[in-house]
Amino acid sequence: MEYNEAMKNRVKRLEGQLRGVLKMMEENKDCKDVITQLSASRSAIDRTIGLVVSSNLVECIQESNDNQNTEDSINEAVQLLVKSR
């Protein structure tokens, strides 16, 4: 699977967000603010996983049309999504 620039940029933003959380912890910021940022990070990770899995599903279906194995490809993509939860 090829990861496009939008996917990579999401991960870069996540990296920056997590670095920001670590900085907040090092500066002994209020726990409510830290939890808020951690929750936002988790949501961003979940959305990124959904994007990668959905892109993978599309790619798998396109490939399986050539191989006539669509059901197996869909099941594999669904298992990836379930595993990510």
Image (cartoon, rainbow, N blue to C red):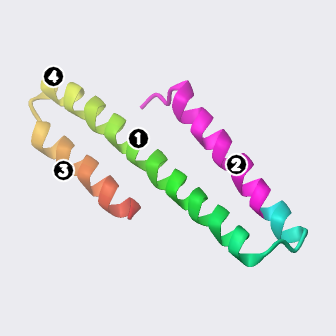
The residue that mark 2 highlights is: 15
Q: Which of marks 3 and 2 is in front?
A: 2
How many angstroms separate mark 4 from mark 3 (CA)? 17 Å
Is there a contact, CB below 8 Å, between mark 3 and mark 1?
no
Q: In this view, does 64 lie to the left or right of 14?
A: left
Question: In the image shown, does 16 or 8 lie closer to the viewer?
Answer: 16
The quadrant where residue 83 appears: bottom left
Q: Earlier in the sequence, mark 3 or mark 2?
A: 2
Location of residue 4 with respect to 15 vertically, above or below:
above
Q: Earlier in the sequence, mark 4 or mark 3?
A: 4
Q: In this view, does 16 lie to the left or right of 5?
A: right
The residue that mark 3 highlights is: 75
Q: Which residue lies furthest to the top in this view?
A: 66
Q: Which amino acid does label 2 sit on?
A: Glu
Q: What element carries label 1?
A: helix
Mark 3 Cα shell of 10 Å, populated few (<14), some (14-19), many (≥20) = few
The stretch of residues the image draws in magenta is: 1-21
Residue pictured at 79% horizontal, 75% vertical: 30
Q: What residue type is labelled 1?
A: Leu
Q: Nearer the viewer, mark 3 or mark 1?
A: 1
Question: In the image shown, does 85 or 62 lie closer to the viewer?
Answer: 85
Q: What element carries label 3?
A: helix
Q: Look at the magenta stretch and give its main secondary structure.
A: helix
Disc number for residue 66: 4
Disc number for residue 51: 1
